[in-house]
Amino acid sequence: MAICHSFAQAEDLFVPVADFANDSQQLTKGKVLEFWGYHNYQGDDNYQNTLKLRYYNPLEAGDWVGRFRLDTSVVSNYNSVLPSNNNGQYSAGNTMITVWGQDRTFLRSLGALVGGRVTMPFGNNGQWAIGPQLSWNFKPTVDTILRVTDFSPLIRYMYGFDTKNNSLTINPNQPPLQRSLQLFPTAGYQLDTNTMLRLWEENPIIYNSAGGGWFVPIDAMIAHRLSKNWVVAIGGSKQLVQTYKQYDWSSYVKISFNF
């Protein structure tokens, strides 16, 4: 009897795999404008502040329906010797364009949203990169104690092919070209009517396919809806495994306007 009781409690806590429905085709048609602020510690007394503008827009072409996302940013790098408000340290960051959607025939058996990303370097360094991605959105058909709202995994492979300042004399600290597999095991949990916990939505697990090594963070964000149009969020990420160096920890906030 105790075993049956424990099993029943586990079912109330977790959502069985069979009780998730693929909801990937239900793409929102709303537009979203977001303002992000990041404060990252890179290790070795190096810090980075980033201000980012992110915009989502619906797309449609014939039978194909999808979404478009634009990211652009300004970055400031500093350490204990150089102050964070040193104007000379500010630079344009990478700009990224991401498109995803689903055609009624192409890769239909996967039940996934198919897309890709292009990274364009600006400022003092960076690299051109391109990569395909697959994503899904599964929603539970039953209620549980954890109040799971969705499981939305995303897989992306980024391939860097040219650096902006590819001379080591100009930029001796530039990173090697990207060859990285990015994994987002994103999950959402409803904390109350207007507040949600999101895991691995902003910072992915990364595998370096060029030289090996993993970067595995724990990434969590709490988002609160102020009104129909406005959402605010605060989050953080901390590396757990870093055989492929990225950052030590990251904190971030966002303000989102939906229209």
Image (cartoon, rainbow, N blue to C red):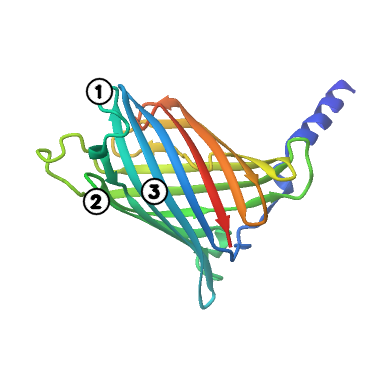
- Would residue 14 appear left or right of 31 to someone viewing this image? right
Three-letter amino acid code of the residue under disc 3: Tyr
Q: Residues within 10 Å of mark 3 (few under 14, many from 20)?
A: many
Q: Mark 1 — residue?
A: 81
**In this orientation, does residue 175 appear?**
no
Of callouts 3 and 1, which one flags the residue occurring earlier in the amino acid sequence? Answer: 1
Q: CA distance from mark 3 to mark 1?
A: 36 Å
Where does the N terminus fall, quadrant-wise? Answer: top right
x 12%, y 38%: residue? 168
Whether residues under marks 3 and 1 lie with C-beta atoms below 8 angstroms apart, the answer is no
Three-letter amino acid code of the residue under disc 1: Val
x 23%, y 44%: residue? 125
Where does the C terminus fall, quadrant-wise? Answer: bottom right
Three-letter amino acid code of the residue under disc 2: Phe
- Would residue 150 appear left or right of 65 to someone viewing this image? right
- Would residue 26 appear left or right of 64 to someone viewing this image? right
Whether residues under marks 2 and 1 lie with C-beta atoms below 8 angstroms apart, the answer is no
Q: Element at badge 3?
A: strand
Is label 3 or label 1 in front?
1
The dot on residue 56 is none
Q: How far from the left and from the top, in percent, is residue 73?
A: 36, 49
Q: CA distance from mark 3 to mark 2?
A: 13 Å
Q: Nearer the viewer, residue 144 or 201?
A: 201
Decide: is 246 above or below 70.
Answer: above
Q: Mark 2 — residue?
A: 161
Q: How far from the left and from the top, in percent, is residue 204?
A: 46, 39
Q: Mark 3 — residue?
A: 157
